[in-house]
Amino acid sequence: MAYIPNTDKDREDMLKDIGISSIKQLFKDIPTEILLKKKLKIPKPLSELELKQHLSNLSKKNSIIKQFIGAGSYNHFIPSVVNHIISRSEFYTAYTPYQPEMSQGILQAIYEYQTMICNLTGMDISNASMYDGASALAETCIMAANITRRNEILISKTIHPEYRETVKTYCHFHNINLTEIDFTDGITSIENVKSKITEKTAAVIIQNPNFFGYLENLKELGNIAHEKKALLVACITEPTSLGIIKSPGELGADIIAGEGQSFGNPLNFGGPYLGIIATKKGYMRHIPGRIVGLTTDTKENKGFILTLQAREQHIRRERAPSNICSNQALCALAATVYLATLGKQGLKNIAELSLQKSHYLLNKLKESGCQELSTKPFYNEFTIKVNNAKKINELLLKNKIACLELEKFYPELKDSLLICVTEMNSKKDMDKLVKIINQKVE
């Protein structure tokens, strides 16, 4: 926030101009019982030099934690070119331009983003990004209900718990009935899907890799959905996996929703991140948000335009398929620069490193006596059962290592830890984690 050096005289002049005599009068409409009674103990102001020294001293108290937590937010290396490009003034905005054709540069960047997302997911159409993965997944439920004209959704319990909470909220206010599907051996129960799907089901929603890290059988689940003329929605929270596993489009998905944070966006207390939605061409007019298109002018010069943005999103809320009117253009730009910098082979290399390192760590933990939740294939996350997860996690944190206890989200998985490994985790750190978990705790 910019520093505004107002003097007492400046404040008096402003109060006079708006017709009041004191700052207290600005808050006269606020009930007195909720107003702060005591004066805040704010320290005296510092000079710029003193403030920098103070902040520097505070920063030295921070602990550097070795991240073995994934669960929707992933610690990947970000090339310096990403921040260099997105910090340029012509790009530094979170919004799709409101006078779009005047902003050919940002429109081209978004067009490139859409193209890359389509290539990765195996879909025909991608929008110009959403707020985050959770809201993107919730938007696809509304989208699926509108496409099929049905009002029931099946959602697997192996989907990120916080995503499911967001989906529940959206579905409740759109009168969409939500049914959760149980899991067996770490993945969605095929039999449970078969028993609960009906002719009223609009979509079956599956995360791949799922919250426990395991790969789901999207092909078979898609066949089950399509037999009932329902859609298969594939949720992706770790998109670097698309560097080595088959795309959801190849496996029969109709709509893709997910989180793009892994592509050039840092871990940042939960955001800002960027939501991904991509789908088949036939569902193009149901996709929320905006799409950038490529066209030519009267002189056959190429140009970029905003197309297929429903006016209902702006002026007739009750008729809108969605009320998303802006996007995470800056985060999407970071993803675009990241993917362009890495290229196809670079993304594959990162995915292979994550895969190899995670399997190395699991094998070491198994050698030390830990039991895995499932023997199903996984990418860079897996779940293990330990003796007293709470105590072990406390011990890990004391040694500046972080894993995730699953009991918070899944009470039935007490004493289970979700562990994630990316290219950022060294062999030294992984061996240290194994050594700590090997310690006996009561």
Image (spheres, rainbow, N blue to C red):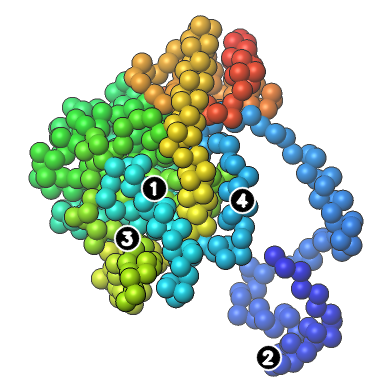
Q: Earlier in the sequence, mark 3 or mark 1?
A: 1
Image quarter of residue 158: top left
Q: Earlier in the sequence, mark 2 or mark 3?
A: 2
Front of the two marks 2 and 4: 4
Q: Earlier in the sequence, mark 4 or mark 3?
A: 4
Q: Which residue is mark 3?
A: 288
Q: Which residue is mark 2?
A: 18
Residue 307 lies, in percent from the top left, at: 32, 68
Q: Nearer the viewer, residue 155 or 107?
A: 107
Q: Nearer the viewer, residue 205 or 345?
A: 345
Position of the C terminus by quadrant: top right
Front of the two marks 2 and 1: 1
Does residue 152 appear left or right of residue 311 in this picture? left
Label 4 to label 1: alpha-carbon separation = 19 Å
Q: How many circles with numbers are drawn on the protein?
A: 4
Label 2 to label 4: alpha-carbon separation = 42 Å
Q: Amino acid at mark 1?
A: Met
Disc ID at residue 116? 1
Secondary element type, mark 1? helix
Label 3 to label 1: alpha-carbon separation = 19 Å
Q: Nearer the viewer, residue 12 or 368?
A: 368
Q: Earlier in the sequence, mark 2 or mark 1?
A: 2
Label 4 to label 3: alpha-carbon separation = 28 Å
Q: Is residue 147 visible?
A: yes
Disc ID at residue 83? 4
Q: Is residue 76 shown above or below 229?
A: above
